[in-house]
Image (tube, grey):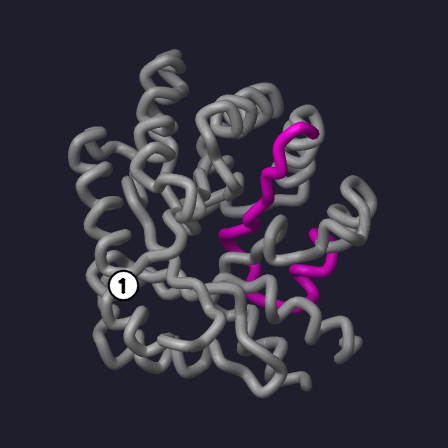
């Protein structure tokens, strides 16, 4: 491992803990882990019930608080999802990772899905970051992933996120490349990529960095346009520094 290169990944990490058995104690540990000797991660990503705690623990620290909505199955009603987002924002969330209603999208309900995501965008307002989770492991086909990315961008996404990490198939290089191509087609708006689902080691992250450099340029390697959603990647990097 190139230690200098590995350090550059730390500020790109959304340090994630989305387990059913999460407790205030595990969230406290996560927030402590997020503040490394080599600088902070980009964000912690946690369930909504822990947002207020994380906001308190990270007060004065340049680490964003991210949480999820319509997660993980993407089948909440619009009303329930919007209410969840509102509450998370009220309690201190900076970023919302919302699952696109991908099952509805696969059934051809594109207008409804876009309206759902536009409502999420409107609720987030201009301040909060909206990351739209496609669940590429369910979309599978190239044209479907490409078109879903375009729809999410048009609906107001700030980031396109590959996966929830809850399906057997998480992030893949192929899916990331398709998403980047769709982002390139909308050069008039800056939209980032969040790679999530199965990225546990530095070695697994490197091919994505190379892909992004090749397609988007080295200047794109910034927390404003690239994130790794991962629970174990940071620990792997820290072990080797």
Q: Is residue 166 left or right of residue 175?
A: left
Residue at coordinates 62% horizontally, 38% vertically from top-left?
Answer: 190
Residue at coordinates 74% horizontally, 47% vertically from top-left?
Answer: 212
Residue at coordinates 55% horizontally, 23% vertically from top-left?
Answer: 150
Q: Is residue 172 left or right of residue 115?
A: right
Judge the density around disc 1: few (<14), some (14-19), many (≥20) Cα neighbours within 10 Å: many
Is residue 41 highlighted in magenta? no
Is residue 201 highlighted in magenta? yes
> Where, by quadrant of the figure, is residue 238 drawn?
bottom right
Query: Can see residue 92?
Result: yes
Q: Is residue 228 left or right of residue 88?
A: right
User: Which one is nearer the viewer's eye here, 172 or 130?
Assistant: 130
Looking at the figure, which quarter contains the N terminus?
bottom right
Q: How many marks?
A: 1
Place of residue 84 in the rendered image (x, y in percent of width and height, measured from the top left): 21, 45
Q: Secondary structure at mark 1?
A: helix
Place of residue 211 in the rendered image (x, y in percent of width and height, measured from the top left): 76, 47
**Span highlighted in magenta in the image:** 187-208
- Vertical relation: 28 (above or below) 162: below
Q: Which residue is mark 1?
A: 51
Place of residue 4 in the rendered image (x, y in percent of width and height, measured from the top left): 77, 77
Place of residue 158 in the rendered image (x, y in percent of width and height, measured from the top left): 51, 40
Residue at coordinates 31% horizontally, 44% vertically from top-left?
Answer: 72
Looking at the figure, which quarter contains the C terminus?
bottom right
> Where, by quadrant of the figure, is residue 145 drawn?
top right
């Amino acid at each position: 491992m190139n230690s200098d290169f590995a350090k550059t990944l730390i500020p790109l990490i959304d340090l994630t803990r989305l387990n059913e058995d999460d407790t205030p104690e595990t969230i406290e540990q996560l927030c402590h882990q997020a503040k490394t000797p080599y600088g902070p991660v980009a964000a912690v990503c946690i369930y909504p019930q822990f947002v207020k705690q994380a906001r308190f623990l990270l007060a004065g620290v340049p680490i964003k608080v991210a949480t999820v909505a319509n997660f993980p199955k993407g089948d909440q009603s619009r009303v329930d999802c919007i209410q969840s987002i509102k509450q998370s924002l009220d309690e201190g969330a900076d970023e919302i990772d919302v699952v696109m209603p991908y099952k509805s999208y696969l059934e051809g309900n594109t207008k409804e899905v876009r309206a759902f995501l536009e409502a999420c965008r409107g609720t987030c307002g201009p301040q909060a970051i909206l990351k739209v989770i496609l669940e590429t492991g369910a979309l599978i086909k190239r044209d479907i992933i490409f078109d879903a990315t375009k729809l999410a961008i048009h609906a107001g996404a700030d980031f396109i996120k590959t996966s929830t990490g809850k399906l057997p198939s998480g992030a893949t290089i192929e899916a990331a490349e398709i998403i980047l191509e769709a982002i390139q087609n909308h050069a008039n708006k800056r939209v980032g990529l969040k790679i999530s689902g199965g990225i546990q080691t530095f070695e697994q992250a490197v091919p994505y960095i190379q892909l992004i450099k090749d397609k988007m340029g080295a200047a794109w390697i910034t927390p404003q346009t690239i994130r790794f959603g991962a629970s174990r990647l940071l620990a792997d990097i820290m072990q080797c520094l």
